[in-house]
Amino acid sequence: MSQPDVQRAAIVGVAYMGEPDDPDALVEAVEVTYGMGGSLPPEALIDGALSVVAPRYYVLEESRRQANWGATGLSVQDVVVLYSINTLSELTTAAIIAGLMKLSKVFHGRQIADAPNVAPLPQYDPHRRSAAELIASDARSGTA
């Protein structure tokens, strides 16, 4: 497959001593989407997402897809990294977002708005569309 049109990287924290397959053990998530002009080579996205959580234990899931059902749709690459949160080396949400943003030349030099005020997400909810929605809902409720 050629260069994907849209790339998404999601990093999901798994609670200490939790199992990656247990939805109740997923405690925080961050997703960054790279679109036209901000894309990077598919292997670089995988390596970069893993470098954000290294040297922690992780599970990597990567998929690529494109539909052609009468009209060709966008090609999409999804990279999901589930990493183990332990009590000594927790990553903050702001650090994960900054690490993912550094992968794309489009984001170079941009600051995360209110990065010092971004707290770990309260609970990963697979029904929400993105981590940005979680952060926005927390900001509206005053918990961020």
Image (cartoon, rainbow, N blue to C red):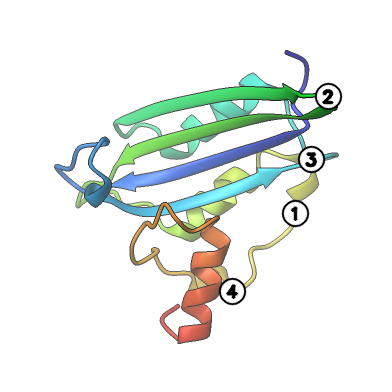
Q: Which quarter shows the C terminus?
A: bottom left
For residue 114, above or below residue 64: below
Going from the N terminus, do you reach mark 2 or mark 3 first?
Answer: 3
Please report contact status of discs 4 and 2: CB closer than 8 Å, yes or no.
no
Under circle 1, the secondary element is loop
Q: What amino acid type should be assigned to the residue bearing mark 4? A: Asp
Going from the N terminus, do you reach mark 1 or mark 3 first?
Answer: 3
Going from the N terminus, do you reach mark 4 or mark 2 first?
Answer: 2
Q: Which quarter shows the N terminus?
A: top right
Q: Residue furthest left?
A: 17
Q: Residues within 10 Å of mark 2 (few under 14, many from 20)?
A: few
For residue 78, above or below residue 126: above
Q: Residue at x 45, y 58 (%)?
A: 93
Under circle 2, the secondary element is loop
Q: Residues within 10 Å of mark 3 (few under 14, many from 20)?
A: some
> Which residue position is annotated with label 3?
38
Q: Residue furthest front?
A: 70
Q: Residues within 10 Å of mark 1 (few under 14, many from 20)?
A: few
Q: What amino acid type should be assigned to the residue bearing mark 1? A: Gly
Q: Residue furthest top?
A: 1
Along the line of sight, which residue is nearer the eye, 76 or 99?
Answer: 76
> Which residue position is annotated with label 2?
70
For residue 125, above or below residue 139: above
Q: Residues within 10 Å of mark 4 (few under 14, many from 20)?
A: few
Under circle 3, the secondary element is loop
> Which residue position is annotated with label 4?
114
Along the line of sight, which residue is nearer the eye, 70 or 74?
Answer: 70
4 vs 2, front mark: 2
Give the CA distance from mark 4 to mark 1.
15 Å
Q: What amino acid type should be assigned to the residue bearing mark 2? A: Gly
- The image shows residue 143 at horizontal and vertical percentages of 41, 81
